[in-house]
């Protein structure tokens, strides 16, 4: 498996999952980079018969969880301004991104990861495998989070 | 298209184009690799240099007392032990990152408990070094009562400062940090159940 191909294919997805968890643009970039360094270090251990996506998401989500070692993590993370974006970006679209990130940031940590993986179109059984939870439990959590997010978007007239 | 599909579209349209390209990632991996190698090289070099210095001291220092020799051996033992601890830490496997989140958190909790063992090892190193000092200076200061008092007085003062002032503060801080981490890990694990 070629590392360059893996990076090109998975880095935007991993970045979004990390951003959903940490709600900070720069830290999400760092977490994405740390994830791919770990991917590169462990690539030899990867079994070809396993699912590469599940494997990479497992590393990424563990990198996110390791953030608790950072003492400041317990404090509420301020949402970083969406910098480095050129003028042509649609403000309305960006406002929606911002709103979605803020809604997810209000969820407990594990739910932030679960919904991030779900929004990346990962099947629920794979999410259960990554988190170490039963499939039934994941299904219940996903259903609950979907309800919360949909309600918030409706209340705030984001649809 | 239902409402949640709209949310999914918003999520998936999040821009990730400011992420570094693959060449920069490869460059950072190389830097990371060479930094790790450099640290290992530096630690091993330090061990070799210390060994050479110790042999040199052993043969150039014509001591008549066994206490001096014992002091020299203990100094070398402390240095070797400290370098060994650091090398071990450097080679610590990150294989736990391949586990699922639940197992990873359990491993992280275990790591926190084990970090107390590392602190104990460093304390042992300090104790051996103090003992080495006690033996080493005996020959040099035995001739004069004033030097003897100054030499050992200095050691006692350092031990008092470290043991009764620095250590309790550092220990309290470390234990608080470990307790905080364990509490946080437990609360994350509860979210998985």
Image (cartoon, coloured by chain):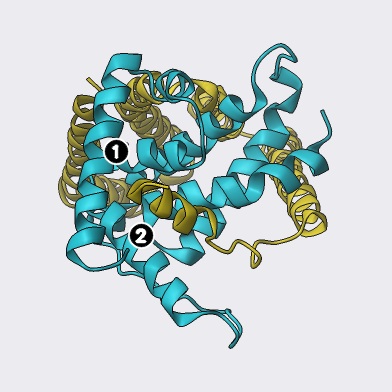
Chain colours: A cyan, B yellow
On screen, residue A159 above or below A105? below
Q: Which residue is mark 2?
A: A101
| Disc 1 packing (10 Å; few <14; some 14–19; many ≥20) | many
Indicate the position of residue A18 as horizontal and vertical percent values: 47, 49
Q: CA distance from mark 2 to mark 1?
A: 13 Å
Quadrant of residue B100 in the image?
top left
Q: Residue furthest front?
A: B1
Residue at 31% of width from left, 24% of height from top?
A: A139
On screen, residue A126 above or below B35? above
| Between A99 and B71, the one nearer to me in the picture | A99
Left or right? Give the position of A111 relative to B20.
Answer: left
On screen, residue B22 above or below B67? below
| Between A49 and B69, the one nearer to me in the picture | A49
Residue at 75% of width from left, 15% of height from top?
A: A48
Residue B161 makes an appearance in the image: no
On screen, residue A97 above or below B174? below
Residue at 83% of width from left, 56% of height from top?
A: B23
Q: Which mark is residue A111?
A: 1
Pointer 1 indicates a residue of which chain? A
| Disc 2 packing (10 Å; few <14; some 14–19; many ≥20) | many
Indicate the position of residue B12 as horizontal and vertical percent values: 53, 53
Indicate the position of residue A132 as horizontal and vertical percent values: 38, 18
* Contact (Cβ within 8 Å) of mark 2 with mark 1: no
* Image quarter hosting the C terminus of chain B: top left
| Between B191 and A44, the one nearer to me in the picture | B191
Residue B61 makes an appearance in the image: yes
Left or right? Give the position of A124 relative to A84.
Answer: left
Question: Along the polypeptide, which appears first: circle 2 or circle 1?
Answer: 2
Pointer 2 indicates a residue of which chain? A
Q: Secondary structure at mark 1?
A: helix
Left or right? Give the position of A17 relative to B109.
Answer: right
């Amino acid at each position: 498996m070629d590392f360059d191909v893996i990076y090109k294919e998975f880095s935007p997805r991993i970045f979004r999952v990390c951003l959903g968890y940490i709600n900070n643009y720069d830290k999400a970039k760092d977490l994405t980079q740390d994830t791919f360094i770990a991917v590169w270090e462990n690539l030899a251990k990867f079994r070809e018969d396993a699912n590469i996506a599940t494997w990479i998401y497992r590393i990424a989500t563990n990198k996110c969880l390791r953030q608790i070692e950072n003492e400041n993590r317990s404090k509420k993370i301020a949402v970083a301004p969406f910098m480095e974006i050129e003028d042509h970006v649609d403000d309305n679209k960006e406002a929606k991104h911002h709103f979605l990130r803020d809604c997810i940031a209000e969820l407990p940590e594990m739910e932030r990861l679960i919904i991030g993986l779900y929004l990346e179109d990962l099947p629920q059984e794979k999410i259960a495998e990554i988190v170490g939870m039963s499939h039934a439990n994941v299904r219940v959590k996903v259903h609950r989070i979907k309800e919360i997010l949909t309600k918030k978007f409706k209340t705030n007239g984001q649809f | 298209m239902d409402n949640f599909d709209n949310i999914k579209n918003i999520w998936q349209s999040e821009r990730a184009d400011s992420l570094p390209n693959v060449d920069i990632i490869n460059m950072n991996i190389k830097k990371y690799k060479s930094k790790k190698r450099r640290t290992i090289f530096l630690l091993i070099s330090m061990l070799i240099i210390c060994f050479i210095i110790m042999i040199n001291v052993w043969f150039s220092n014509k001591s008549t007392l066994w206490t001096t020799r014992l002091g020299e051996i203990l100094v070398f033992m402390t240095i070797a032990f400290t370098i060994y601890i650091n090398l071990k830490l450097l080679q610590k496997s990150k294989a736990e990152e391949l586990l699922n989140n639940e197992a990873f958190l359990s491993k992280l909790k275990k790591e926190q408990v084990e970090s107390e063992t590392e602190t104990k090892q460093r304390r042992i190193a300090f104790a051996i070094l103090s003992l080495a000092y006690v033996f080493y200076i005996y020959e040099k200061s035995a001739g004069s009562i004033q030097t003897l008092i100054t030499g050992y007085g200095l050691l006692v003062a350092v031990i008092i400062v470290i043991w009764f002032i620095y250590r309790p503060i550092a220990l309290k801080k470390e234990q608080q940090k470990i307790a905080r981490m364990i509490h946080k890990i437990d609360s994350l694990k509860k979210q998985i159940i």
